[in-house]
Structure formats: C-alpha cells, structure tokens
C-alpha cells in the first residue's frame, strides 16, 4: 500500500506538500488517488521537529472539511494524536487513525477502524534536541511489541506498526532502524499486523553526502528507501510523491505494462 500525504498546515517541513486551504487539500487528495494512492493521510498539525502544538478546535477546522470532501473517493486516514479529532474524522469518513502518540488504540477499537502505532521519542517541539538510546532497534521493538499487545487486547482489528523514522532519532538511529526492517516485519507478523514506514523527504536523507540537501532535493532517497522498505517486509509506505513511488513499486513487483 502507498499512503499519500495531505498536510493541511502552514508549517509542515516540505513546503510543496502544504495545503492551507480546504479546496487545495481536497484537490491534492484527488490527485493522489488518481496517481495510485491506496489511502490518503490527512493531517492538520505538523509533527516536524520543532513544531508547536495546534488547538483541537483549529485542527478540526482544518481536517474535517477535507475528509468530508474526499469521502467516497478513496480510503482516508486521519493523522492526529487527539481523541476528539480522531472521533470526528471517523464520523466524517476516515477509516484509519495514524497515531504519533501511540495512545488511541482504544478509540480505534471502539470505532472499528485501523490503527497505526508509531514510535516517537518525546514531542515534536523537542524530540530532535538530543535523542539517546542504549540500543535503538531493541528499544523501538519493545515499544512496538507493547503497543501491539495493547491494541490486540483492546480489540483493534486492522493494526499497523511504524518504527517512527525521524521522530526522536538521529541520523545513525534512522539508518539502524532501516537496516533492521526485516526484524520489525517479523515482529509485525507475530501480531498479524502490517509494517509501515515513512522516510519521505526527511532530513536524514539529505545528510548522506558532503552537501546537506533540503526537502525539495530528497526525492531519490525517498524512492530508494521506500523500495528498500518494501523489500524488507514493509507493506505500507507513507510518501509525498505518490506517482513515482507507485511506479517504482510496480517495477519491483514486475507489474509494468510493456504491451
């Protein structure tokens, strides 16, 4: 599955994906579906490093009209940490809660929708200040296992686990997690869950060479890591650039039409 990103925010880290107006966000969602997105993820609060929190009332104003405008056009996810926003989004047409906080399993279970449990160390405002782990792979795995158990005990049906690339992790932490995605995939399999990975346009992709690349120049790294994640067992990738990611996946899956 390819999840396309809709940021109804003025401050998300990739400027080209920002859609501050409802009509623009709906139009972007329709384009993402047309490009092959299996699901679109609508968020009204930036979770980039250093981002400030948004009031629930403001977040609702941003996302609910967009979800209502896209309802029936394809599958929709709500990217939120707030229970009130999650509930309103499901009423409006969302069938997945993409949860950076890891706290909304019981809401997803009650409402009968999918839940993405994503690992994050700290809150967006401070998570990249100086993140430390004894062993990032084992600590993230322990967190994911605990939340998978919680989700199943709560009654979540469709469960996704996300190691949270870029969320309270250094350059080295992110690459260590990517190098062990097969381990996380096996962990997800134990709970009959799917592994989802989001690397799209993130900062660590621009730090590989001698020159630091901005978000607009990280497309190649985004596609490469999305394909690598799939080959390591991920079954959903969250991306800004749907069309090229879908094409890359089709090449890997040998689904290119050469007739």
Image (cartoon, rainbow, N blue to C red):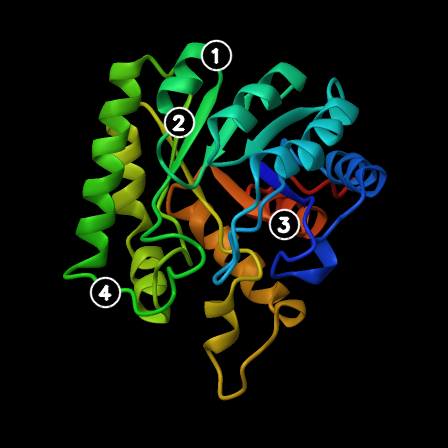
Considering every residue shown, the one lying at the far left of the view is 134
Rendering coords of residue 54 (x, y %): 57, 45
Q: Which residue is mark 1?
A: 111
Residue drawn 71% across the image and 53% down it: 17
Residue drawn 36% across the image and 62% down it: 174
Q: Nearer the viewer, mark 2 or mark 3?
A: 2
Q: Which residue is mark 3?
A: 245
Label 4–label 3 contact, CB within 8 A: no
Name which of mark 4 and mark 2 comes first in the sequence: 2
Quadrant in the picture for the N terminus: top right
Q: Give residue 179's quadrant in the image.
A: bottom left
Q: CA distance from mark 4 to mark 1?
A: 36 Å
Label 2–label 3 contact, CB within 8 A: no
Describe residue 29's horizontal placement relative to residue 176 as left or right: right
Give 150 or 176, whichever is nearer the viewer.
150
Q: CA distance from mark 4 to mark 2?
A: 25 Å
SS label for mark 1: helix
Q: Is residue 236 visible?
A: yes
SS label for mark 3: helix
Q: Which residue is mark 4?
A: 132
Q: Which residue is mark 2?
A: 104
Q: Measured along the vertical axis of the image, is residue 160 above or below residue 258? A: above
Dot 3, how many residues are within 10 Å of its Cα: few (below 14), some (14-19), or many (20+)?
Answer: many
Label 4–label 1 contact, CB within 8 A: no
């Amino acid at each position: 599955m390819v999840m396309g990103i809709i940021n109804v925010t003025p401050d998300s880290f990739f400027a080209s994906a920002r859609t501050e107006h409802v009509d623009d966000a709906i139009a972007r969602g329709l384009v993402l579906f047309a490009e092959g997105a299996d699901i679109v993820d609508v968020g009204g609060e930036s979770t980039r490093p250093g981002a400030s929190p948004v009031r629930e009332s403001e977040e609702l104003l941003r996302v609910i009209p967009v979800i209502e405008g896209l309802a029936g056009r394809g599958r929709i996810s709500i990217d939120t940490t707030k229970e009130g926003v999650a509930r309103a989004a499901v009423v409006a047409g969302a069938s997945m809660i993409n949860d950076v906080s890891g706290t909304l399993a019981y809401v997803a279970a009650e409402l009968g929708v999918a839940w993405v449990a994503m690992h994050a160390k700290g809150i967006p405002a401070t998570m990249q200040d100086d993140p430390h782990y004894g062993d990032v792979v084992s600590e993230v795995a322990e967190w994911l296992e605990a939340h998978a158990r919680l989700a199943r005990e709560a009654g979540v049906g469709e469960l996704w686990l996300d190691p949270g690339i870029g969320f309270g992790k250094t350059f080295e932490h992110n690459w260590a997690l990517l190098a062990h995605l097969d381990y996380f995939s096996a962990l997800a399999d134990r709970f009959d869950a799917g592994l989802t990975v989001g690397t799209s346009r993130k900062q660590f992709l621009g730090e590989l060479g001698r020159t630091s690349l901005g978000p607009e120049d990280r497309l190649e790294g985004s596609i490469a890591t999305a394909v690598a994640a799939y080959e390591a067992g991920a079954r959903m990738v969250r991306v800004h650039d749907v069309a090229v990611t879908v094409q890359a996946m089709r090449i890997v899956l040998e689904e290119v039409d050469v007739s």
